[in-house]
């Protein structure tokens, strides 16, 4: 039983070491992308999806009658804590399928203005790969255009857009002087706790060896 538990703990520790290397590579990719200027997004219909977190700039027309909301998030505002969501606007590009743009946070209070730039508009942001709903994901409200998973195919289909770009563009930029939406001001930084997890699993393995050695020594004496 001790040998089986030891193998399990060592396996979990080694898995976390591999996860640490994987997360370090992602964080390095994000840091490199954040330091680079936005690049023009190809508009050919067969263009492949850019690498996740790549900063791009794209020009087109916002399909304002096809907007949707994503998620639910409480933020502190000058008037207090507000419940809001992310505003999703389809961007129609010449010679390419529509691109769903997450213009980021808007307040759900109807008194707060939503100010969108006039068309044609150029939006800079970073590439967010598609997500798929998990077992415990909230169910999308298709009729109300409220979504809880960033799945461009599902959102685009619900908005009647047909084929859309296979990723979401998360808008970057300074906050507006007043009103909403409030774009992201930096790329995401996923937490990296895998070193602590690896130390924990390896520490438990070492403790198991010590406990077994004490027990075996005591058993040998009797």
Image (cartoon, rainbow, N blue to C red):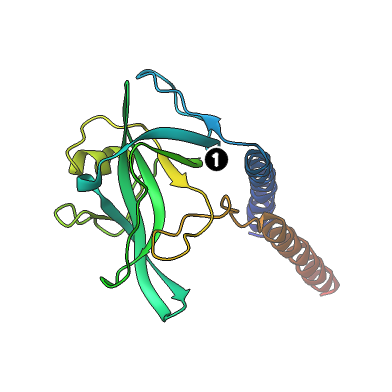
| Residue 205 spot, x, y in % from top left | 73, 60
Q: Which residue: 70% across, 56% down? A: 198
State the image quarter where residue 163 is shown: top left
Horizontal and vertical percent position of residue 112 = 32, 70
Residue 136 showing in the rendered view: no
The residue positioned 48% from the left and 63% from the top of the image is 177
Mark 1: few, some, or many residues within 10 Å (few <14, many ≥20)?
Answer: many
Task: Name the residue rendered at 55%, 38% in the picture.
Answer: 55
Residue corresponding to mark 1: 53
User: Would residue 156 be visible to someone looking at this image?
Assistant: yes
> Can you give x and y, in whole percent of width and height, for residue 166 in the image?
37, 32
- Say which of 32 and 2 sits in front: 32
In which quadrant is the N terminus drawn? bottom right
Instruction: Give residue 94's quadrant in the image.
Output: top left
23 vs 222, left or right, is left
Residue closest to the far bottom: 80
Along the line of sight, the residue nearer the viewer: 88 or 147: 88
Q: Give the answer, above or below, for where 171 lies relative to 71.
A: above
Q: Nearer the viewer, residue 153 or 76?
A: 76
The total number of labels drawn is: 1
Q: Nearer the viewer, residue 23 or 194?
A: 23
Which residue occupies 28% across, 73% down? Answer: 111
Question: Helix or strand or loop: what does disc 1 sit on?
Answer: loop
Q: Residue furthest left?
A: 143
Whole-percent x, y for residue 129 in the image: 44, 39
Q: Is residue 222 above or below residue 210?
A: below
Q: As drawn, is 200 to the left or to the right of 147?
A: right
Which quadrant of the figure contains the C terminus?
Answer: bottom right
């Amino acid at each position: 039983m001790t040998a089986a538990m030891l193998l399990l703990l060592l396996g979990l520790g080694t898995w976390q070491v591999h996860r640490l290397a994987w997360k370090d590579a992602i964080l390095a990719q994000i840091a490199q992308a954040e330091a680079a200027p936005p690049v023009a997004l190809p508009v050919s219909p067969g263009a492949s999806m850019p690498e996740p977190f790549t900063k791009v700039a794209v020009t087109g027309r916002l399909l304002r009658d096809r907007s949707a909301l994503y998620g639910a998030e409480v933020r502190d505002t000058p008037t207090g804590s507000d419940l809001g969501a992310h505003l999703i606007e389809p961007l129609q590009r010449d010679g390419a399928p529509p691109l769903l743009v997450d213009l980021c946070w808007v307040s759900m209070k109807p008194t707060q203005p939503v100010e969108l730039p006039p068309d044609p508009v150029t939006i800079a942001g970073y590439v967010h790969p598609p997500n798929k709903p998990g077992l415990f994901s909230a169910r999308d409200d298709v009729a109300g255009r409220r979504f809880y998973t960033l799945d461009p195919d599902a959102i685009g289909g619900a908005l009647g857009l047909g084929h859309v770009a296979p990723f979401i563009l998360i808008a970057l930029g300074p906050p507006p002087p007043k009103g909403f939406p409030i774009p992201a001001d930096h790329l995401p930084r996923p937490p990296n706790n895998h070193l602590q997890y690896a130390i924990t699993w390896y520490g438990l393995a070492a403790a198991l060896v010590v406990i077994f050695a004490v027990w075996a020594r005591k058993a040998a004496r009797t």
